Structure formats: C-alpha cells, structure tokens
Image: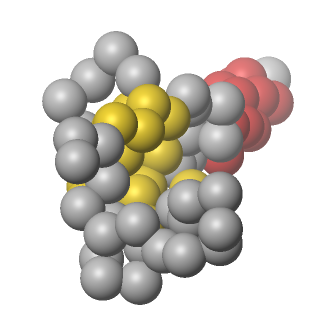
Amino acid sequence: MEKKVLLFFLALLCAGISFGQETSITGNVVDSNGDPIPGVSVVISGTSRGTVTDLDGNFMLNALPTASLVFSYIG
C-alpha cells in the first residue's frame, strides 16, 4: 500500500514539474519594409524579465509557453 501511495506522489510531482517548465522563445523584430529593428525591448508581461533585440532584430528569452510578450521601441 505504501509503495502505491509513494508512486502516486512521485508521478504527481513529475507531472507538475513538466508543466511548469520554461521554454526558449526566439524571434526577429522587423519593420513594415522587412528591415530588422535593433534595440527593441522585449519583456514578459507582468514581470521585469526581458531582453533587447540585437543588430539583426533577433531576440531570445526563456518564458512559460503561455507567457505574453510586450514589445516597445523608442526611436
């Protein structure tokens, strides 16, 4: 009986860990002409975690798959 309870809780723990993991989100920010935009701020909504696009407009950010990203650019 104890083994079954232990296995149940281990399975529950593993399921919780797999659903709460972050994934790497990558992208490229371009203007209406298709030219890359460097220096765009990309932030996970509701947090202070974010990054800035490189000279080619590329970014990479680790976030939950359900996260919303906020893009802002002054220029």
Residue at horizontal 43 percent and vertical 55 percent from the top? 62
What's the residue at 56%, 31% (across, down)? 67
Which residue is the extreme one toward the bottom?
Answer: 56
Q: So how many labels did they put on this image?
A: 0
Residue 34, above or below 65: below
- Is residue 24 visible to us here? no
Q: Is residue 28 above or below residue 12?
A: below
Compared to residue 42, the image places residue 60 above or below, namely below
Q: Nearer the viewer, residue 4 or 62?
A: 62
Q: Residue at x 54, y 75 (%)?
A: 35
Residue 38: x percent and y percent? Answer: 31, 69
State the image coordinates of residue 23 (x, y, percent, origin top left). Answer: 57, 57
Mark yes or no: residue 37 visible. yes
Q: Nearer the viewer, residue 39 or 26?
A: 39
Residue sitting at 30 percent across and 82 percent down?
55
In screen coordinates, is 1 left or right of 26? right
